[in-house]
Amino acid sequence: MYFSRFLSLHALWVTVSSVIQHYPSVWGHYDVCKTQIYTDEGKIWDYSACQPEAIDMMKYVKVNLDPPNITCGNPPENFCGMGNPYMCNECDATIDELAHPPELMFDAEGRHPYTFWQSTTWKGYPKPLQVNITLYWNKTIELTDNIVITFESGRPDLMILEKSLDYGRTWQPYQYYATDCLDAFNMEPKSVRDLTQQTVLEIICTEEYSTGYMANSKILHFEIKDRFALFAGARLHNMASLYGQLDTTKNLRDFFTITDLRIRLLRPATGEIYVDPHHLTRYFYAISDIRVVGRCKCNLHATGCREENKKLLCECEHNTTGPDCGKCKKNYQGRPWSAGSYLPIPKGTANICMPSISSIGKCNCNRFGSIRDRCNEKGMCECKQGTTGPKCDKCLRGYYWHNQGCQSNVCDNELQICLNGGTCEKNVRCLCPPTYTGVLCEKPSCEGNSEACNTGQRALTLPCLILLLPLIAPLGLSGFFLF
Ligand SMILES: [Ca+2]
């Protein structure tokens, strides 16, 4: 039992060693993820963590509105301007020019007037007019830039931005927005500029984006970059510092990670303290654009992310798999899975998944005697040179079993015979008498025997010996040396 335990420990070490040798360029490096950049000192390699590029995530978003019939136009209705309640337009879902469906929050802009989604008006007042807009990707995403929402109505008096990390099963607030934080949410109003490295994870209520209807204040932010700047400096010039924090602080990583976003519109812009019940067509929500920029979360095990069947998937490297490269591939569970690190060389490590010990014996091929770590498609082990047997665990004639498989014999009793009284030790080497040396003890040793060394009289050269062999063989080697 102890022997077999020793064997498995030994096998583990040999496998680990071979893996280290197999991945020299990425062991502790990011060779796969280096790019050439130009600096004052010329062109250099920039090593970075393996992660996909940041992209416009709205290209891949799916949206769900609750309640489902909250979009205006069915039936058609009028809505009027906040500043002038007698300046009205019509929303009609059956006429393209007058319809405001949800997809107009994500279409390409660049034209004026902007296209926008719009809710029904607040005709049910004083019952609250509330809408949940859920954005989801069926993929874990890391935010890399501010979330920006552009309103075509006034910005809401009350709103909560929420996030989910588990595909909408549970939700956490990201930021509260209100014209009066204390009154609405019993929270002191704060700005992202009040945050520090120590309080970066704090969920705040801000009054910055709820100032009512003004032509120049349509936009609402959730500030990702300001939070990054707490670690990377105002112009984000020291990303290494941010990455160092992300590497060691899971909560910080999770803070910028989402699977879903939920915009909870709780009270439309009213523009004044009291809602005018005679002009309820002035109160509604309208959003022309939502901007979410981020990258697929691949746990630093992929540089690519592709869309397949309308789903984003990491193109996993480092022997990892799963939508987020969140586990080791089959047969690569030689050690527990771990995310790569953000830091570039020399501190970073890719945390590659290593081959499993068990994977090597799937057909029970001998791990040292077989070429591959598993059998071929016919279920056969493929043996290395000098190795044979169904499991590649036996040596051909002329080979001996060494720690690492079969190696050709140095000496044996049949083909390669130690000469001049030398004896063959385990087919590995000839043990020569003091007066001879060489692989087969075929050369006279010069040490303490200068005469023989000089004249070579007492030593038979190898070619000579080979010629004499047929004659002396019947006498036996001992008889020959007596002669
Ligand atoms: Ca639009």
Image (spheres, rainbow, N blue to C red):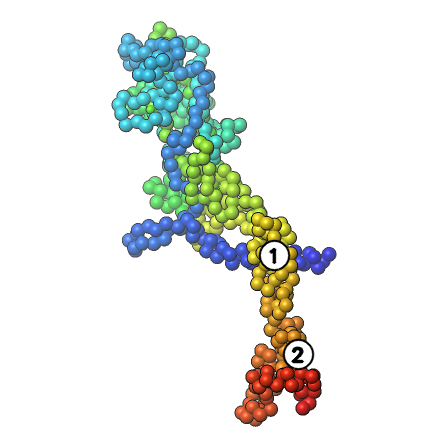
Which residue type carries mark 1? Answer: Arg
Name the element at disc 2.
Answer: strand
> In which quarter of the view is residue 312 placed?
top left
Q: Position of residue 354 (x, y in %)?
A: 55, 50
In front of the other: 141 or 206: 141
- What is the number of the mark on residue 367? 1
Residue name at image x 54 percent, y 55 percent: 19
312 vs 122: above or below:
below
Q: Quadrant of ligand 1?
A: top left
Q: Is residue 455 left or right of residue 48?
A: right
Q: Earlier in the sequence, mark 1 or mark 2?
A: 1
Which residue type carries mark 2? Answer: Thr
Residue name at image x 42 percent, y 20 percent: 265
Name the element at disc 1.
Answer: loop
Q: Which residue is mark 2?
A: 423
In front of the other: 431 or 87: 431
